[in-house]
Image: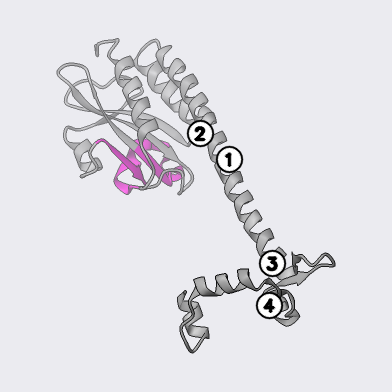
Amino acid sequence: MTDATQAILPYPVDAEAVRDFLRAEPDFLHQDPDLLSDLGLRPDASNIVDFGPAALARVSAAHEREALVRRQIEATARANHSAQAQTHAAVIDLLDARNHSDLARRVDEMAILRFGLAAGVVVLEGPGRVPAGWHALIAGQIDMIMGDHGVARMGFHAPALGLFGERIDEIKSMALVRMAVWEPSRQGLLAFGSADPEGFTADMGSDLVAFLARVVERTAERWPIL
């Protein structure tokens, strides 16, 4: 017995006893048209209880909910498949880079053309030379930007806006992933910026951008910084 039943009835009712009674006395329900009407049911000419408008409405609503969930699952599956295909193509593009500046250019093009973002930036801390096309930071600045987020930080973070240079006004959310390149390792970031405030959110997984960061790391290590 539910709380709603207790609120309607002034005395306790055993639901199993009610079921047993209706099974033993099926005519009790069939011969009470007012009760059938209250339940949204109706008897047809063959003495079979049929669904009335209220019951049909409930069935239709349940069906619509199931159809909506199915459409959402299908849309998510299509989006995941598309993202995987774009990621595979992006990796091939990155591996074809000829030098550090070409790699940075390809990261930006990948972000814009393949993922519909506003920018993609490769960041490297000093001291020491920073390749052409990469965004330079002073030592310790990456830790300041990342705070206690460890490897990845997703969502809008105002201190990271400067990474995007002239496109700073377009950036409404971002994905930041740490990199460590060359030996001895130097701290870097792979940064993506979106014009959509919901493009990257704090509760979003970072697996995809972390994977791309690892590809950029390994590709960059092909060439020394001269």
Where is residue 25? Give x, y as percent: 65, 73
Label 2: element kind: helix
- Seen at 55% across and 42% down, the residue is 73
Q: Is residue 124 above or below residue 93?
A: below
Extent of the magenta region: 151-175
For label 4, the residue is 28
Gap between marks 1 and 2, in whole Å? 9 Å
For the residues bearing labels 4 and 1, Cβ distance under 8 angstroms: no
> Closer to the observer: label 3 or label 2?
3
The colour scheme used here is one colour
Q: Residues within 10 Å of mark 1 (few under 14, many from 20)?
A: few
| Residue situated in front as seen by the camera: 27 or 102 | 27
What residue type is disc 1 on? Answer: Ala
> Closer to the observer: label 4 or label 3?
4
**Disc ID at residue 19:** none
Q: Residues within 10 Å of mark 2 (few under 14, many from 20)?
A: few
- Seen at 39% across and 18% down, the residue is 103
Gap between marks 3 and 2, in whole Å? 38 Å
Q: Earlier in the sequence, mark 3 or mark 2?
A: 3
> Closer to the observer: label 2 or label 4?
4
What residue type is disc 3 on? Answer: Ala
> Closer to the observer: label 4 or label 1?
4
Q: Is residue 226 above or below residue 112?
A: above
Q: Earlier in the sequence, mark 3 or mark 1?
A: 3
For label 3, the residue is 55
For label 1, the residue is 75
